[in-house]
Image: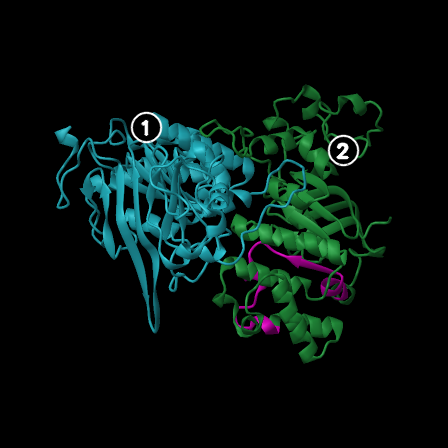
Amino acid sequence: MSALLELEGLSIRLPTPRGPRTVVHEVDLAVEAGQIYGIAGESGSGKTMTMLSLLGLLPRGGTAHGRATFAGRDVLGADKKARQALRGRNLSMVFQDPMTSLHPMLTVGKQLTEHARKHLGLSKAEAAARAAQMLEDVRIPDGEAALRAYPHEFSGGMRQRIAIAIALMCEPQILIADEPTTALDVTVQAGILALLDRLRREKGMAVVLITHDLGVMSSIAERISVMYAGRVIESGDARDVLKTPSHPYTRGLLGSLPQPGESAGTELRSIPGVPASPLDPPRGCAFHPRCALAVEACKEAVPPLLRRGDHAAACIVTMRDVASEEVVA
Amino acid sequence: MSAVAPTSPGGSARADAPALEVIDVEVVYERRDRDPVRAVAGVSLTVGRGQIVGLVGESGCGKSTLAKAIVGLEKPRSGRIVFEGRELSPLTRRARPIEETRLQMVFQNPFSSLNPRRRIGAQLAEALQMAWPGSRAGGTGSLRERAAALLELVGLPANAADRYAHQFSGGQRQRIAIARALAADPTVIVLDEPLSSLDASAQAQIANLLVRLSRELDLALVLISHDLAIVQHIVDEVAVMYLGKLVEQVPSGELWELPAHPYTEALIGAIPRADGERTLPVALAGEVPDPSAPPPGCRFHPRCPYAFDRCRAEEPPPIQIGRGREVACWLHEPGEEPKRPGELAAARGGDAA
């Protein structure tokens, strides 16, 4: 099965006060229809920037290099018009803070129906009926009244669900969700995760789920890529990555999570130090200054993604057994 | 200890008093043309010296309002806040009595509470100058030396004093905010969501730091958070808040295995587990109701899977169960051993509606 969204060697350069810097390096990933693909990493790891490049939303002066295709069509080289057609119908995005994507002066109904009428050519009545249905799907009570209300009249959790409803109005083939539940309570988060999973099952929608929360990732993602300092450092089947993490960074992230039921008062394990800046990463493996397993060679060269079957990790220590078989580019 | 216990209009500090007592506090927001909101609808909570208490609940439950009321940033309509045995005077535009500065607060976003244009050292020095002269932090050495000592206490190098807030990561900025609170030599710090703006690895570091500081300095902490998973790890006791009231108080060691209130059980069930099993967390039905028109009876009953007739009619008072536990739920009987709500509801059998 060919992938719906495919990135090959995608790199992103941004202008900085000290000249242009590459902040995302050679990202490969393939998302299939009906698949939930998780991209994990801490702030500054490049996960959001990678997805913004697909929508043509990089900061001013930023450039994307490499290849990105949606259903076989080039995305990076697309002109403004082609991109606009792509957004909404095929690909839409939800951000962490719903107030950045909701218009404070327009009713929820207007914001829900505007794009559907434009992209799907629906009549006013058809669009309104669909909007009411969509609000019901995201469990907003009293949909009719909600359509006439303004964003500020809703709680944070409801606003995020409205933003998700807007993103889903045109039945996109793929939804890019950037920390969609990070600002929400776990009780509300659980409902949104269930909704995304249901849309995947029922409508075959693919989701790229960007989150630093490995628990969220674990509950719905099928595949995972973990990013650190602008590179994918581990990827594979979600179960493999979470149960047998191969990169020391992934292991550290999982280890730093509070284990449910683990006796209270035990010290949380944490990764020493602070995340590497993607603008000025350490030489060699960007994680080496924080890594307990680091050897001399880690300081020399950036490790390639080494594969053990379907599971890949960029670590010459934990993947030593397969390191020799690889052709190091 | 008389030298360190100056008197104030609210009475004098008692050495044997708990660090902090919140007694039946109610905070009400009046609104023009609309019903007032009882954001905190009568909460009592005791924090022992050196104890870490977590206050958890969904957004809108009133936990941040209660935090502000504790430090004096909100004026309670009724009830009392007693700090080291002395009733706190309301915060006004005048400087707070200096002994009351030993009750400190750390906010969620350290980037907005630190001054972006002043060096960290200058901000710490200012806090040290305002500290109580009888305190440890008011001790010997130059301001610079004492600022360096504060930075060391929170795990930062002394040269951090020469830098600005933007030059630090989120976790480091939170350390600086904690250092500044420590300048007053506090006995209680109220922290409002101190971990929620941080990445996972920084969260664990700050959580460990808070536990260490509490133990080393005999410092009581009130940790406000929506993240039950991390809270239960670092606190001694958890207080669960729903719609302006506490529904359960439980030692953190018993919380996970034996939540007594249906709401606590729902909060635990909604936490996603990073076990690679692709199991969806359990969603809690319904919405948090409008706090200006709380449901009659038990405030949680419209969302409670076990609610029966009494829950819809009468509000359950907090009762003692097990050892040192409190719960406000009609499923429980005073003095009995704590049991899971599902078990008690099943035992009720035909009674349940």
Q: Nearer the viewer, residue A323 or B204?
A: B204
Screen quadrant of the N terminus of chain B: top left
Q: Nearer the viewer, residue A230 or A39?
A: A39
Residue A212 is covered by the magenta coloring: no
Residue B225: x %, y % from top left: 44, 44
Which residues make up the magenta segment? A85-110
Residue drawn 46% across the image and 43% down it: B344
Instruction: Name the residue at the front extreme.
Output: B350
Element marked by disc 1: helix
Displayed quadrant of residue B29 = bottom left
User: Callout 2 environment at 10 Å: few (<14), some (14 to 19), or many (20+)?
Assistant: many
Q: Nearer the viewer, residue A61 or B183?
A: B183
Residue drawn 31% across the image and 60% down it: B28
User: Callout 1 environment at 10 Å: few (<14), some (14 to 19), or many (20+)?
Assistant: few
- Given the image, on which type of amino acid does mark 2 rest? Ala
Q: Are marks 2 and 1 in contact (CB under 8 Å)?
A: no
Would you say A130 lies left or right of B2 here? right
Residue A161: x %, y % from top left: 58, 60
Residue ID for mark 1: B217
Residue drawn 32% across the image and 28% down it: B217
Would you say B332 lies left or right of A243 here? left
Would you say B311 lies left or right of A192 here? left
Q: Chain of mark 1?
A: B
Q: Chain of mark 2?
A: A
State the cyan chain.
B
